[in-house]
Amino acid sequence: NAGVTQTPKFRILKIGQSMTLQCTQDMNHNYMYWYRQDPGMGLKLIYYSVGAGITDKGEVPNGYNVSRSTTEDFPLRLELAAPSQTSVYFCASRRTSGSNEQFFGPGTRLTVL
Amino acid sequence: GESVGLHLPTLSVQEGDNSIINCAYSNSASDYFIWYKQESGKGPQFIIDIRSNMDKRQGQRVTVLLNKTVKHLSLQIAATQPGDSAVYFCAENSGIIQGAQKLVFGQGTRLTINP
């Protein structure tokens, strides 16, 4: 099992550019999450999904979009990058029942200049 | 709204000593709490969780204590080792929507182990 994988590891964007952060898990987990982590802070929930075709907003969804066409993939889209979106982005997944544990990917460090 | 905070942003302990990391929460309706460990450059890693109807839970070298009266959570690490150096986050589950967790994370405490 590779667990949760994220690409790219690092990215620099110019203001107004768009990009997609990729997230894939091979554990057949239904629940998937996107978080952002600003320097010296805890994680904030951007979007989550309870299964293929079902997504919903978290605490800080503005400026982001997601889709979930398969169980494995949960990409995060930034349409018009802004400096306030400079952060480290983590994807996580969790199985349907039996555990509260979320498994996190290694993160994508995004800088918007 | 909900908030989860920590009393100390940094903690230094001697190798072999016990560490205690504290966390305050504000949402009395949270049904469980989780501690995560984050090593430099990595994603958070689950350590232990505790349900709101429990006062104490033990794992391997770790103990979590929950005091609902003062809305306080602590993580005790026994006989700390160099590999315990990391940032530790507490998180509370602020709700369940269609079975999905909505975790609210604290700021984190950086634990440094001195040789």
Image (cartoon, coloured by chain):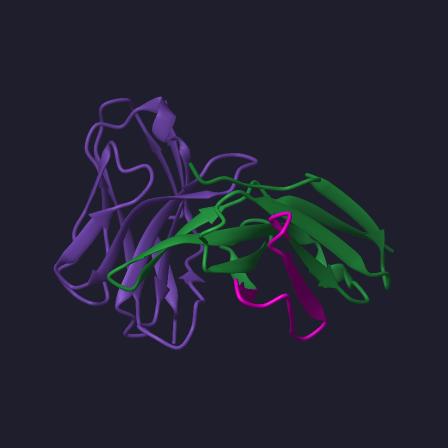
Chain colours: A purple, B green
Span shown in magenta:
B48-72
Q: Which residue appears at 45% of the width and 40% of the height?
A: B2
Q: Image height check: is B13 above or below A96?
A: above
| Residue drawn where x is 37% and y is 25% of the image | A84
Q: Is residue B105 magenta?
A: no
Residue B52 percent coordinates (x, y): 52, 62
Give the vertical position of A90 relative to B60 (above or below). above
Q: Quadrant of the C terminus of chain B?
A: bottom right
Residue at 27 percent of width and 53 percent of height? A48
Q: How many numbered badges does the structure rendering display?
A: 0
Residue A53: x, y in percent?
12, 59
Is B106 left, or right, of A14 in this rendering?
right
Q: Residue A3: x and y, percent? A: 39, 69
Residue at horizontal 44%, vertical 52%?
B29
Magenta stretch contains residue B57: yes
Residue B108 occupies quadrant: top right
Tell me: B60 left or right of A84.
Answer: right
* Percent coordinates x, y for residue B78 in the rendering: 78, 67
Would you identify the image quadrant in which residue A15 lies?
Answer: top left
Q: Nearer the viewer, residue A113 or A57?
A: A57
- Quadrant where the image shows the N terminus of chain B: top left
Splitting the image into 4 quarters, where does residue A73 fall?
bottom left
- The relative height of residue B67 versus residue A51 in the rendered view (above or below) is above
Q: Nearer the viewer, residue A65 or A19?
A: A65
